[in-house]
Image (spheres, grey):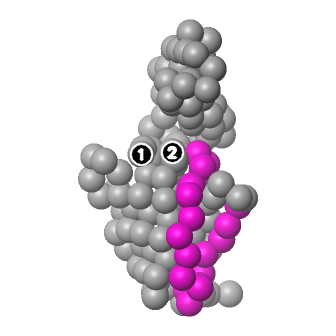
Amino acid sequence: MAHTPFGVEVLTPDGELFNDEVEMVSTRTSTGSIGILAHHTPLLAMLDPAELRLYKSESDIVRFAQAEGYLQMTGERALILVEEAVPPDQLDRSTLEARLRAAEEELERAEEGSERAAKAGRDKRRLECFIELAGSSG
């Protein structure tokens, strides 16, 4: 069954990655998974690393490995602001694994409770998610 399309924009610090109409957005917030359809109640949510799925139709799905960020739904438009978003087929598993090792080492060196430890922990969670998505893209 087709759903009413609505506008979605995905932005990273590097610029716009997506700006089109979709029937549904599926991602993960800090409180759990969420699916957004047109006419959704206004919403502001923190996003956790996950697979972002933008359903242009039931068979046309745009996918991204999404880092931390924010989702804002207002009226008939969703704005997704994330630190990083990469199509899963463009993820390089060996590079991600090397970055993960570096994040784990940084986490071990950082003082517990420090901002440095918090950043390393966020990096570790994001990279673990991206590695999982890299494994499922092929």
Residue 21 image offset from top left, x and y in percent: 42, 78
Q: Residue furthest left?
A: 15
- Which amino acid lies under the numbered mark 2 shown in the image of this protein? Ala
Q: Main secondary structure of the magenta part?
A: strand
Quadrant location, the C terminus: top right
Q: CA distance from mark 2 to mark 1?
A: 6 Å
Q: Residue at x 55, y 15 (%)?
A: 110
Identify the element where label 2 is drawn.
loop
Residue 34: percent from left, percent from top:
67, 67
Q: Is residue 41 magenta?
A: yes
Q: Are marks 2 and 1 in contact (CB under 8 Å)?
A: yes
Residue 72: percent from the left, percent from the top? 48, 71
CA neighbours of label 1 inside 10 A, class few (<14), some (14 to 19), many (20+):
some
Residue on which disc 2 sits:
67
Q: Is residue 42 above or below residue 55?
A: below
Q: Quadrant of the N terminus?
A: bottom right
**Residue drawn at x 57%, y 55% as measured from the top left:** 47
What residue range appears in magenta? 33-56
Front residue of this view, candidates 115 and 137: 115
The residue shown at (48%, 34%) is 91
